[in-house]
Image (cartoon, coloured by chain):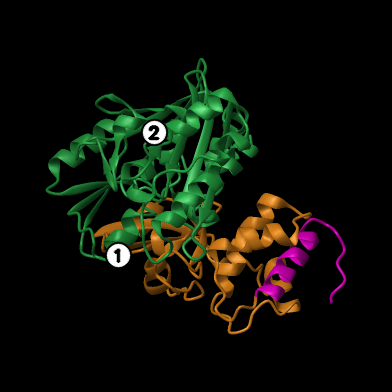
Chain colours: A orange, B green
Amino acid sequence: MTTVSMTLNGKKVSANVDDRTLLVQYIRETHGLTGTHVGCDTSQCGSCVVHVDGKAVKSCTMLAAQADGSHVTTVEGLANGTELHPVQAAFREHHGLQCGFCTPGMIMSAVDIISRHGADIDEKTIRHELEGNLCRCTGYQNIVKAIQAAAQEMHGAKVAAE
Amino acid sequence: MYDTTYHRAGSLQDAEAKFAAAEDAKFLAGGQTLLPTMKQRLAAPSDVIDLGKVPDLSGISEGDGSLVIGAVTTHYEVASSDVVKRLIPGLAALAAGIGDPAVRYRGTIGGSISNNDPAADYPAALVALGATINTNKRSLSAEDFFEGMFMTALEEDEIVTNVSFPVAEKSAYAKYPNPASRYAMAGVFVAKTSAGSRVAVTGAGSDGVFRVSEMESALDANWSPEAVAGISVPADDLLSDIHGSADYRANLVTVMAKRAVAAT
């Protein structure tokens, strides 16, 4: 057993867990934050993407102990109270989901993509950047549209809702 | 995953001591291969020794005519480094194409080369650029380091500390990714170095990375895509599986070599 402490969505947490505990298990099972999903469990699908020290990583492919001392943000940590994060709002506005299973990972990856590329990100780049996030409903059109809209929204450009 | 004991190394010496004290330990860098392998119960180390936070093993620096990359430097750091882009642009481009963005934030150059997956991208760059792999025990040339599929010259308790690349005059990498896994079915790194033109292939060889001397001579005489267009590698030593036959891969090697030269 090992003690893993971190700042999870702005709150200091600590727990004694098996050394082999994956970060995603620590988030979901130890701390009850089930917004982060386990899809493929083989680092392909991206449903489990969270931010560790500001970087979007697959939490099924990281030990909780590796994140000891880190700042971890999950999809539950994005909104400001009842006000959705612009990426969450854009996914709702543009219907960027069908069944919703991949959505938490899509949103966490999208926040990272937008922070690296800024407002002018084009559709091709978004699609390429989503290489590690799979939507089994194949609802990519609206996911891409939502990310593009959020990028413009977050960087000040006015976007008309479609 | 079977039970294991996790240790975070604070320094290289600490990592060595922890490894020596454990029964059957493995070093952990970014974990993008080792952890999936452990989850599938294909590896069951008694202890994992995390090198990820060892300060001396991380970072990118410019030497006298060389580029030095610490072993636990991530693919993201290599891909986005202005120093790498300026000195060896082909290497930055290669790192930008490994896995996906989330994998690139965790995966490391030292971890990738120590694993020596036959479809990994980095081995082609290290061999083509004539890189030197420095460990806690010695220095090895890339060609001596990579010994075959998932095989390297590393001893069990040996740790890659950094990789030193001589700056190349020209460099580029082109790969044909498997449409599903995105692993290279054939990846070709070309470099114009002080030691002449070099061409190294990953993803296609049944024994891992290899050089194509015929293409190297042709590029020495004429650095252009046309120079390699008529040169094909023998299919005998190439991988053949459900994704593509050896003949198909042989053709891919020529096509990727042309594309890589064209990109310089």
Q: Observer-nearest residue: A152 or B232?
A: B232
The residue positioned 55% from the left and 28% from the top of the image is B219
Q: Is residue B168 visible?
A: no
Q: Position of residue B138 (x, y in %)?
A: 26, 24
Q: Identify the chain of the residue marked 2, using the numbered disc in the image.
A: B
Is tag 1's residue or tag 2's residue first in the polypeptide sequence?
Answer: 1
- Given the image, on which type of amino acid does mark 1 rest? Lys
10 Å neighbourhood of mark 1: few (<14), some, or many (≥20)? Answer: some
Q: Position of residue A9 (x, y in %)?
A: 53, 63
Q: Which residue is mark 1?
A: B39
Left/right of residue B169 with respect to residue A22 in the rendered view = right
Across the whole image, how many numbered discs are drawn on residues? 2
Q: Quadrant of residue B131?
A: top left
SS for callout 2: helix
SS for callout 1: helix
Marks 1/2: CA–CA distance: 26 Å
Which labelled disc corresponds to residue B57? 2
Q: Position of residue A77 (x, y in %)?
A: 57, 66
Magenta stretch bounds: A140-162
Majority secondary structure in the magenta region: helix
B230 up-or-down from A83: above or below: above
B144 up-or-down from B93: above or below: above
